Image (cartoon, grey):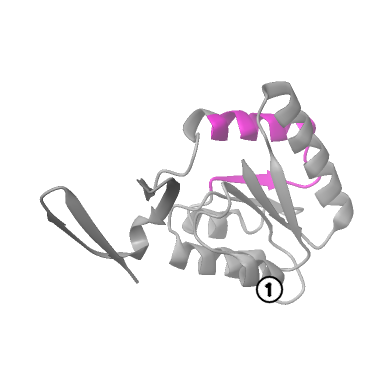
Amino acid sequence: MNIAIVDDVQMETKAFIHSAKEYGALNRIEIDVTCFGSAEEFLADYSPLKYTLIIMDIYMDGISGLEAAAKVKERDRDALIVFLSSSEEHYPDALKLHAYDFLKKPTTKDRIFRLFDDITSKTTEPCSNLKFTCGKETIRLPYTSIASVTSSGHYSEITDE
């Protein structure tokens, strides 16, 4: 499971990573975490299907977590985004963006474990892509990137954007 954590408070990030790694060890799930100190840094790295889960703080300098999440949803409406905030003030805004969950800071290990239980029961791998083998290489192509598909006999041609 690839997780992106976007939060400008390192103490919160470290606590979340610790709980995520512990969950992974207990459940034999490989969990890779990439941390970003700002929404701008995250958006520069982001591409659809790169992360199984995005943990997004709402209050940050520069672009807010809500603005960043809106940009992510423009590119991948199925992205799993969980907001992390010290205030529930923006809970309605998070729902409008179809957030998967909303965690109040400081969050507990039990709450993080429940979140991962929910996610792992729903998602084993991103399914909003076309997976095929070409030669010996497995290729995953997001459905949103497919421009056309033509087929003739035993051959298919896929054109992406």
Secondary structure of the residue carrying tag 1 is helix
Image quadrant in which the N terminus is located? top right
Identify the image quadrant of residue 106.
top right
Specify whether 83 is left or right of 74. Answer: right
The quadrant where residue 44 appears: bottom right
Q: Nearer the viewer, residue 79 or 34?
A: 34
Residue 73 position within the rendered picture, expressed as x and y whole percent measured from the top left: 48, 62
Identity of the residue furthest to the right in this view: 11
The residue lying at 52 percent from left, 69 percent from top is 71
Residue, x 45% and y 48% (percent of image)? Answer: 137
Image side of residue 101 versus residue 98, left or right: right
Amino acid at the residue labelled 1: Glu
Vertical side of 58 occupied by 79: above or below: above
Q: Estimate how packed mark 1 is, as few (under 14), some (14 to 19) or many (20 or more) residues with alpha carbons within 10 Å.
A: some
The answer to if 109 sits in the magenta stretch is: yes
Residue at 49% across, 39% down: 125
Q: Is residue 130 magenta?
A: no
Residue 72: x %, y % from top left: 52, 64
What residue would you read off at disc 1? 40
Q: Is residue 110 visible?
A: no
Residues 2 and 78: in front is: 2
- Residue at the extreme front of the image, as rendered: 135
Q: Nearer the viewer, residue 139 or 109?
A: 139
135 relative to 95 in the view: left or right = left
- Residue farthest along the left direction in this orientation: 153
**Where in the figure is residue 90, as x and y percent of width and height?**
62, 59
From which residue to which does the magenta span run? 100-120
